[in-house]
Amino acid sequence: MGTIIWLAGLICAIWCVLDIFKKPIGLIGKLIMTVIVLATSWLGLALYYFWARHHVTSWFSSIRLTIKKATCLGRLF
């Protein structure tokens, strides 16, 4: 029974990682999300599937815009 649960978790984790790498975000964002999902096991898989997969692109696009603004401001000073 434990082997079946482990295999189901492994298949779901692989599916999540493949889905994360299809998202139009940067490599660093993809790696961060992958590590979070894999490190939190079933809880991470559930959170990613039901909530995070719809919001990931907006999270990392806003981070990218913030970094661009900070670097542009740094050039001014």
Image (cartoon, rainbow, N blue to C red):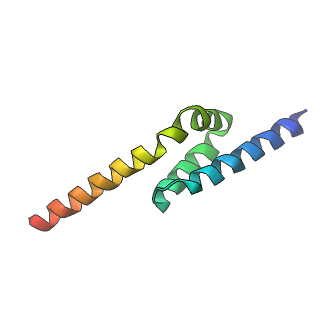
In the picture as drawn, the residue positioned furthest to the right comes out as 1
Which quadrant of the rendered structure holds the C terminus? Answer: bottom left
Q: Position of residue 60 (x, y in %)?
A: 41, 50
Number of callouts:
0
Q: Position of residue 36 (x, y in %)?
A: 56, 45
Q: Residue at x 87, y 35 (%)?
A: 2
Position of residue 18 in the picture relative to residue 68 (left or right): right
Tell which of 33 and 21 is nearer to you.
21
Is residue 6 found left or right of 31 in the rendered image? right
Above or below for 33 versus 55: below
Identity of the residue drawn at 68% across and 35% down:
42
Residue at 47 percent across and 40 percent down: it is 55
In which image quadrant can residue 71 be found?
bottom left
Q: Position of residue 32 (x, y in %)?
A: 51, 52
Quarter of the image with the N terminus is: top right
Residue at the left extreme of this rendering: 77
Residue 19: x %, y % from top left:
62, 50
Q: Is residue 6 left or right of residue 14?
A: right
Q: Quadrant of residue 8?
A: top right
In the depicted view, which residue is nearer to us: 25 or 74? 25
Q: Residue at the location (18% across, 63% down)? A: 72
Q: Is residue 11 above or below residue 52?
A: below
